[in-house]
Amino acid sequence: MTKASAGRFFEDFELGATLACPPARRVGEGAVAAYLSLTGDRTAALCGRNAPLHPLVVFHTVLSQTVRPVSFNAKANLGYAELVLRRPVPVGAVIRTEAEVVGLRETSSGRTGIVWVRTDAQDDDGPVLSYLRWVMVKKRGDSPTPWRDADAVVPATAPTVEPGDLHAPTRAMTTTGRWFLEDYAAGEILDHPEGHTVTEAEHMAFTRLFQNTARIHFDAVLTEGRPLVFGGYTMSVGYAQALEGLDNRQGLLAINGGAHTGPVYAGDTLSSRSEVLAVDHTAQALRLALRVRNQRGEGVLDLDYWERMPRR
Amino acid sequence: MTKASAGRFFEDFELGATLACPPARRVGEGAVAAYLSLTGDRTAALCGRNAPLHPLVVFHTVLSQTVRPVSFNAKANLGYAELVLRRPVPVGAVIRTEAEVVGLRETSSGRTGIVWVRTDAQDDDGPVLSYLRWVMVKKRGDSPTPWRDADAVVPATAPTVEPGDLHAPTRAMTTTGRWFLEDYAAGEILDHPEGHTVTEAEHMAFTRLFQNTARIHFDAVLTEGRPLVFGGYTMSVGYAQALEGLDNRQGLLAINGGAHTGPVYAGDTLSSRSEVLAVDHTAQALRLALRVRNQRGEGVLDLDYWERMPRR
Amino acid sequence: MTKASAGRFFEDFELGATLACPPARRVGEGAVAAYLSLTGDRTAALCGRNAPLHPLVVFHTVLSQTVRPVSFNAKANLGYAELVLRRPVPVGAVIRTEAEVVGLRETSSGRTGIVWVRTDAQDDDGPVLSYLRWVMVKKRGDSPTPWRDADAVVPATAPTVEPGDLHAPTRAMTTTGRWFLEDYAAGEILDHPEGHTVTEAEHMAFTRLFQNTARIHFDAVLTEGRPLVFGGYTMSVGYAQALEGLDNRQGLLAINGGAHTGPVYAGDTLSSRSEVLAVDHTAQALRLALRVRNQRGEGVLDLDYWERMPRR
């Protein structure tokens, strides 16, 4: 056996196992600047004095920590749910992560399987983030696994994070825009005006910024010349675009569900639209549906999330 | 009316109005490293111990803060004048900006207008930068505006910043080169030897580093496949190239005038030449004309600026 | 004579001369994040709490400081030897460098010569790095130089850094992997599974991150459309790939020898293999041979180095 492992295949996952996700990572000012530079995010509460880490910087760091143990041999990143940011995380935090295997199902093709993991991340002050994610992973061989048909274990997922589970608003919130929580209503549509053309160098640099090493994003030989864009990049670009119309937002609080509905490649031009799904006055939060599309109008990401929006 | 605005068009500008330019932005070590990485700048006084922010980092940050309120729908960035850096700005400063509309003129085409803004930026210690800029902005519609022909308001611009208005030299200046202020003479030409090929990913990442969201730089669909390079990038590349022959320079102090004389696109190779316009022994400053050209020898930037150069 | 010099040609080197290598450079958190983003390195000991600068960040910074005085007109970077990191270098160190010319040989073509330099770098706490490097530099003219045939001065190079010269292990080493020093044996091969496709923007940004201004890396006109990738980038990509199988490594300690055996261009996909050459239990170090190849299987880098690997 060689020490240079090619990562876990579907057969290697054990239900209930807890997987270490090294390395623990210090996320400092350099990552903050690189994130802005690669996404164009301008959220005032996340780039000014004493701004915490961007919630998506925390999420991408944690998710990427799980790539080596979970999704190095992934075929597709299928979804997220029950993602909760526990609190603002300071710049310079050292983030460490564990993932528990909570579901396994072989697909009908017999060549892949779906793995569900519950991920928990901490810094020195305690939990910062947890979520459920499921991903399609290649099988090592052709033999059937125990996780077929009726024997598959598929965890139930909550349709939404409850507003009561969102972390409390900070006392002083940064506002620079005209509209506040009271101005939004369920059903309202925001067409964000910016387009963002994805370059190969940027999507790769973004992916590596978080130490995500999934080969499909970096290797033009493996992907026949078309490395796939990391879904986290699409999410961050869409989120950055969504600022227009949500100028007073304070940062994503939770993800109810997310699905990468189409692949993104270098050269694609992304644009975004948001729909207000709900307004929660107690939590000071908007539930939003973000849809990111490519230049042909094809959806590439649907994200259902809670965003903090202050009251007037 | 949608909350996701497509930005101001020419008709939306009001003479004398002061426009807020959020977000206030903390500019830290990450931006410093990204700037070096994207431009190749090696100015000793700006990358060693206790170096302040690069003056062009301050300028690009401030100018980019004005994009959303002023030039989101710009057709062209026409010029700068009367730009003065008030003092060295420390790494980690939080910079906030306001812009006042001081001139308006509809162009003869009837489809665009020129907007002059006076921009002022501060950090916690007071003013850091001010300048005048004018930019061609699309009109929303075809109806004539009040700012035509004789009714246009065009501010006078000073041909140069007076040496007496440049901030004072710091006591200990960083010198590593052979030539000092006394060695330069008006009329002297410096042909800088470096060439710099612009890549799409780098010019876009540079532009977003400063939170400049002008769509023309990022959107390949909008620009028919040729996103325009942000003029600030051309300026920074030229300034980096100009170090050779000006090794002891301490950093740009003021811009007397600047004009983007031709477009720059990814794939262009830039090179630079400087001419010494004046030597001011009291202010310890050189007035320089920087001309940046592309690989066909076409000028793309003319910059007339004051540079601090220490005495021997 | 113009002040904007085109750099030293072979005729300009004087045996025994010590060359200043400005500017002194502060290497902070921004460079740390950019390095991770461009290389994908995940070495746990180099990205977590209180991690020092990556040894290759120190090396590339120092080598790049020597480009202006030594290799601005280089045709090829031929080799390294006797490279020793004196100790871990903290993030934020200010690094200054000197290079002494210790060898000169005109090549048989009469158009280039080989220059050997001994480089020494310090921060405020003393020496951080020294090494010998040799590089092929263009001649300014056709006239023969004194450094031909028997008159050439070629320094002897030690075949390896002695384990006793490696800096001492730190008390608490960061380990996250399964294998320790005792688990490795000379002759063992590690085939690292990752591929890395090089983009033009990233190799250029990486090169400039270290203020390396060798024109051959940036100028598509000079290089007929194919800027050469900085050898330091290939080294860093290969080193990043080599983590898989060496998970507990603490960072490169010394380079015994290195040779760029083939050119790398944007679009190439790099992959790596390591061979264990020796295991030193006293120094807690592995001697490793890293071979980086391109997508056609052609070798592009051979690196013989010492790596700290803790005991179980």
Image (cartoon, coloured by chain):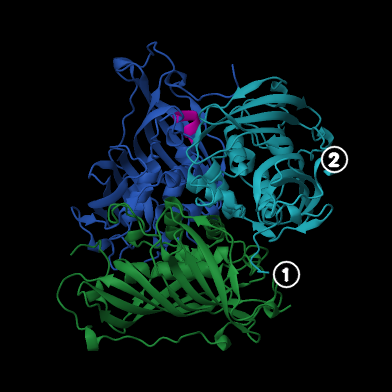
Chain colours: A cyan, B blue, C green
The residue at the point 19 percent across, 80 percent down is C145
Q: Which chain carries label 1?
A: C
Whether residue A6 sits left or right of residue C204 in the image: it is right
Reading the image, the residue beneath label 1 is C178
Q: Are marks 1 and 2 on the same chain?
A: no
User: Splitting the image into 4 quarters, where does residue C211 fall?
Assistant: bottom left
Chain for disc number 2: A
Which residue is label 2 attached to? A150
Q: Which residue lies furthest to the left in this view?
A: C143
Identify the magenta region: B66-71
Point 80% across, 32% down: residue:
A159
Q: Which-is-in-front pick, marks 1 and 2?
A: 2
> Around disc 1, counting alpha carbons within 10 Å, would you say few (fewer than 14), some (14 to 19), or many (20 or more)?
few
Kind of element beneath mark 2: helix
Predominant SS of the magenta segment: helix
The amino acid type, in three-letter code, at marker 1 is Arg
Q: Position of residue B84 (x, y in %)?
A: 39, 44
